[in-house]
Image (cartoon, rainbow, N blue to C red):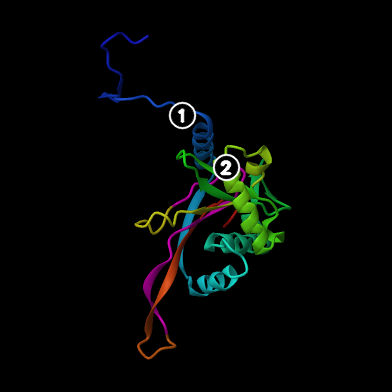
Amino acid sequence: AQEPGATDHVNGVPVARRIPLRGIQRVVANRTLAGIQSTAHVTAMAEVDAEPLLAHARDLREQIPGLTLTHLLIKAAAACLRKHPRLNATIEDQTVMEYAEVNVARALALPSDDLLAVVIKRADECAIAEIVTRLRVLQERAEAGALSKDDVHGATFTLSNYGMLRTVIWATPALTPGQAAVLGIGRAAQRMVVDKTVPEGWSVRRVLPISLTYDHRIVK
């Protein structure tokens, strides 16, 4: 036991407060560390023209209240995973295992400042409206502390949206154990881009920064 008046030190520096990791925080911390330690992770970054996607979202929002860019990106990612199954895989015993299902996890920040991921099962088979509904229900369950084991397990790919961080352009999201890749989405912002359709040769368009972290053992 620590003697009265004694001060804890770490690396020769006094410690002001100890904050044990518990519950969700401990689980997330352990899984994040495991994902980094057990994979050959690489992150590729790019910018994509967001104007067509944003216009599509505006059109669909009239029929699907609550739709956001994230819902469209989940659907788009799921479709891409069907075409590129190596991104929807894992590796065990020196063998790449491509999953039969496309289950997309969406990282959520909770009011408690905890972070967890809920799972849209068979996202490639879902209509956009179904993704909107299922994600809303999962968000409500998460906020109420009522998520089931099935709500948070079985993901084959993760989408992490850090667009709410206004000054952050790109990030390097960490892989989840059992997954080959995670897609990070930044904030769509206006940029000057080359545009050969106008006399000036350039125009201002909204551009979306994306970052794909993947396991280089699986994806070359």
Of the residues under marks 1 and 2, which one precedes in the sequence? 1
Q: Which residues are magenta?
A: 172-195
Q: Is residue 161 magenta?
A: no
Helix, strand or loop under label 2: helix
Residue at 57%, 73% in the rendered image: 59
Report x, y in % for residue 160.
51, 52
Q: Can you give x and y, in whole percent of width and height, for residue 180 in the image?
A: 59, 50
Looking at the image, residue 26 sits to the left or right of residue 165; the answer is: right
The residue wearing badge 1 is 21
Amino acid type shown at disc 1 = Leu
Q: Which residue is mark 2?
A: 142
Residue 185 lies in the magenta-colored region:
yes
Q: Residue at x 43, y 69 (%)?
A: 207
Q: Nearer the viewer, residue 34 or 118?
A: 118
Amino acid found under the numbered disc labelled 2: Ala
Image quadrant in which you'd find residue 18: top left
Q: Dividing the picture into quarters, in which one does residue 1 lie?
A: top left
Which residue is at a point 25% across and 11% down the rendered structure image? Answer: 5
- Along the horizontal axis of the image, is 65 left or right of 18? right
Mark-to-mark CA distance, 1 and 2: 19 Å
**Where's the C terminus, which quadrant?**
bottom right
The disc label shown at residue 171, or none: none
In the image, what residue occupies the spot 43% across and 61% down?
187
